[in-house]
């Protein structure tokens, strides 16, 4: 007595290995996060530009009015040019302007323009140039002056603290003459921690005013301003190294002239550079630039036209204790800069903004820990997004990632607007967006592959069901194995040929596939026929034949019960086709068939196809009760019964592909038929 083995405890094979599921999503998310983190240290141009635009967007909410009333602007504007003529003015006029400003109580007068050549309107210069050009000229003055206009301006500058602007050159394209070092405010001392200015840009030359003017100036200051890649001005240098020494900007030089404290200390602590002046800690970036905290008004600082000063309109003492910045103001003179808000401001406003930022001790600061905070945010949002997308549905992940991205932006904006701390949210936000987008696509691809696997498994299950059910018939009738295979292929050939005809456009690839799958079940009802009838060698009696004909109804009822017992009968389309084929493949076109005597188009197409395939195979195959007949005779019989037993269109399809029928009949010969042939005497 044999003992059957216990049921297998082996787990079913996974549709997809683990590495193609959650693990691959998490691993991909980690890789994307790491790649995005690298952009913090190696930023392409596109990222740099995006960060600038995002900075401007966040900065638009910072509304701070001027915090000091020290800077005053005096501009060479359109009104002044209309009254006194084109720019540059004769320097005697500029001397009178400087005298008036000192007389009104200005603590410091800063001149934001260059005068590297002698004044061409001075009489001495005119005479010299006329002689150079071999023109008759008046006798020069006896005092031997070369430029009395510049001398007049120099005398005016000596009457008070006057700062004079100059320009550092970084291009190195033109050989500039070697000039003496600029004059710092008297007593200015800069102490440096080693390496604190190592990364700062280093000029290779300078353009200064003529010596008569630089000697008269209390101090000088450079007027360079750095524009970002998009042309906007967001930062300016306060100190620049030249020949081993640090020199102040015009704004800083004017501030030092206005104060008795002229000691500066430059320190670098954990990647953060700070310029310390008294109790003020001025944050600088790694290149020594101050981020400008532009004030929120259209004209934030007191302004006077140069004409009003020259016309002596201002009341006495109105500029007492002020730092007066003098320079071009008219649009045509070109000293205008684009700000992050999109406004265009003059160079005088830029200098005044620097002065106001320092005096008010309010700055926009990118702290040394900003890069670390951004890296932490990138890793946190990237890993969190990866984990969520690997475990949750898309909607929940989208809401969570969106909330995290928005929160990152809102937090960074709040720090900038309220505290002046600039931490860029761009790459953390970009990390979430990239991870969500890529992982969503990857997740969709994985799920699509799972669906394909499930679909393939379902198709294989359907095929298994068909094979299992058809083998029931084969177990009862030993002659049906080859018959099932041949009729299946016949049905497919007929269906594909019909699909080329205008009246059968509904025969798409899916329908042909389902018809082909259904074909092996057409004789499944024979399992309900007794062996004495099913395997009888001789002719059947009328009563036996009636029982044999019932196999169509038996098979159809069996499939009906199967279909009705499932919760989703729409998933069993192939069984619907099989049910039609089982029930109607013995119906005749003229209505003389069984079991219901259907005629013409009342007969389902599945039944019409199998009717021809079944008869053809029965005719060309040897059975225990008959001999086979040749293909040509079977063809003649089918053609003769077109419109009687068979659908004329199906017959036409058969005639068009009859050679394929003959080939299949030869290829798929029943084992039983071969045995009968070889054992025949």
Image (tube, rainbow, N blue to C red):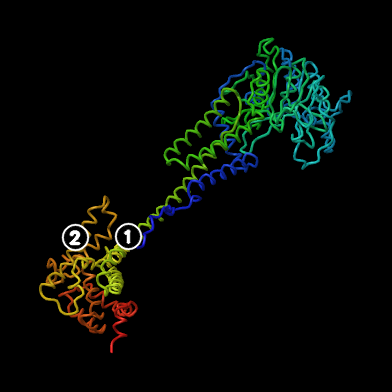
How crowded is the residue under tag 2: few (<14 C-alpha within 10 Å), some, or many (20+)?
some
Residue 568 versus residue 149: which sits nearer the camera? 568
Residue 206 versus residue 42: which sits nearer the camera? 42
- In the picture of the structure, the residue carrying the numbered disc 2 is 557
Which of the image's four quarters has the N terminus? bottom left
Quarter of the figure with residue 312: top right
**Can residue 559 be seen?**
yes
- Determine whether the residue tagged by mark 1 lies in a helix, strand or loop: helix
- Determine whether the residue tagged by mark 2 lies in a helix, strand or loop: helix
Q: Is residue 358 above or below residue 175?
A: above
Residue 63, x across and y down, in percent: 56, 22
Residue 65 versus residue 599: which sits nearer the camera? 599
Q: Is residue 196 above or below residue 44?
A: above
Query: Real-space Cα distance between discs 2 and 1?
Result: 19 Å
Residue 664, x across and y down, in percent: 32, 77
- In the picture of the structure, the residue carrying the numbered disc 1 is 462
């Amino acid at each position: 007595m044999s003992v059957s083995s216990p049921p297998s405890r082996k787990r079913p094979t996974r549709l997809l290995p683990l590495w193609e599921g959650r693990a691959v999503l998490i691993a991909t998310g980690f890789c994307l996060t790491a790649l995005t983190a690298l952009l913090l240290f190696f930023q392409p141009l596109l990222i740099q530009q995006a960060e600038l635009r995002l900075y401007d967007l966040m900065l638009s909410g910072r509304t701070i009015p001027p915090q000091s009333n020290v800077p005053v602007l005096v501009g060479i504007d359109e009104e002044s040019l209309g009254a006194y003529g084109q720019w540059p003015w004769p320097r005697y006029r500029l001397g009178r302007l400087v005298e008036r400003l000192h007389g009104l109580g200005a603590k410091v007068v800063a001149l934001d323009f260059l005068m590297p050549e002698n004044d061409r309107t001075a009489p001495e210069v005119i005479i010299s140039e006329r002689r150079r050009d071999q023109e008759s000229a008046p006798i020069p003055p006896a005092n031997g002056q070369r430029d009395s206009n510049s001398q007049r301006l120099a005398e005016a500058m000596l009457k008070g603290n006057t700062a004079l602007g100059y320009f550092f050159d970084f291009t190195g394209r033109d050989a500039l003459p070697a000039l003496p070092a600029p004059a710092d405010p008297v007593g200015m001392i800069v102490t440096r921690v080693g390496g604190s200015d190592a990364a700062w840009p280093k000029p290779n030359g300078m353009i200064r005013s003529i010596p008569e003017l630089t000697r008269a100036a209390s101090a000088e200051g450079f007027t360079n301003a750095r524009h970002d890649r998009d042309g906007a001005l967001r930062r300016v240098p306060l100190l620049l190294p030249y020949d081993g020494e640090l020199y102040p900007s015009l704004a800083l030089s004017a501030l030092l002239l206005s104060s008795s404290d002229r000691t500066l200390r430059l320190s670098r602590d954990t990647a953060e550079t700070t310029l310390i002046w008294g109790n003020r800690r001025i944050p600088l970036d790694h290149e020594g630039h101050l981020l400008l905290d532009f004030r929120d008004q259209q004209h934030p600082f007191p302004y006077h036209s140069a004409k009003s000063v020259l016309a002596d309109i201002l009341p006495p003492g109105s500029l007492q204790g002020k730092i007066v910045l003098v320079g071009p103001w008219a649009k045509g003179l070109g000293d205008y800069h684009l700000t992050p808000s999109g406004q265009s401001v003059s160079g005088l406003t830029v200098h005044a903004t620097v002065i106001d930022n320092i005096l008010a001790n309010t700055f926009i600061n990118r702290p040394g820990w900003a890069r670390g905070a951004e890296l932490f945010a990138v890793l946190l949002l990237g890993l969190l997004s990866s984990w969520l997308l690997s475990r949750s549905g898309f909607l929940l992940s989208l809401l969570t990632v969106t909330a995290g991205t928005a929160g990152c932006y809102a937090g960074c904006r709040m720090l900038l607007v309220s505290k002046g701390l600039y931490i860029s949210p761009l790459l953390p936000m970009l990390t979430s967006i990239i991870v969500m987008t890529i992982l969503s696509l990857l997740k969709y691809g994985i799920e699509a592959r799972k669906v394909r696997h499930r679909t393939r498994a379902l198709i294989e299950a359907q095929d298994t069901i068909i094979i299992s059910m058809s083998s029931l018939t084969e177990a009862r009738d030993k002659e049906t194995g080859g018959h099932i295979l041949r009729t299946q292929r016949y049905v497919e050939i007929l269906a594909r040929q019909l699909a080329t005809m205008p009246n059968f456009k509904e025969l798409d690839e899916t329908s042909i596939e389902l018809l082909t799958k259904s074909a092996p079940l057409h004789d499944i009802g024979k399992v309900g026929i007794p062996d004495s009838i099913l395997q009888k060698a001789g002719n059947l009696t009328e009563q036996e034949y009636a029982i044999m004909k019932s196999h169509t109804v038996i098979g159809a009822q069996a499939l009906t019960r199967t279909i009705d017992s499932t919760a989703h009968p729409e998933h069993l389309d192939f069984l619907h086709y099989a049910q039609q084929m089982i029930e109607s493949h013995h119906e005749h076109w003229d209505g003389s068939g069984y079991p219901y005597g259907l005629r013409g188009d009342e007969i389902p197409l599945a039944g019409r196809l199998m009717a021809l395939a079944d008869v053809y195979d029965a005719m060309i195959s040897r059975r225990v009760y008959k001999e086979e007949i040749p293909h040509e005779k079977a063809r003649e019989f089918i053609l003769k019964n077109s419109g009687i037993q068979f659908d004329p269109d199906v017959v036409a399809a058969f005639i068009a592909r009859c050679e394929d029928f003959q080939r299949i009949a030869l290829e798929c010969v029943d084992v039983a038929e071969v045995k009968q042939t070889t054992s025949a005497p």
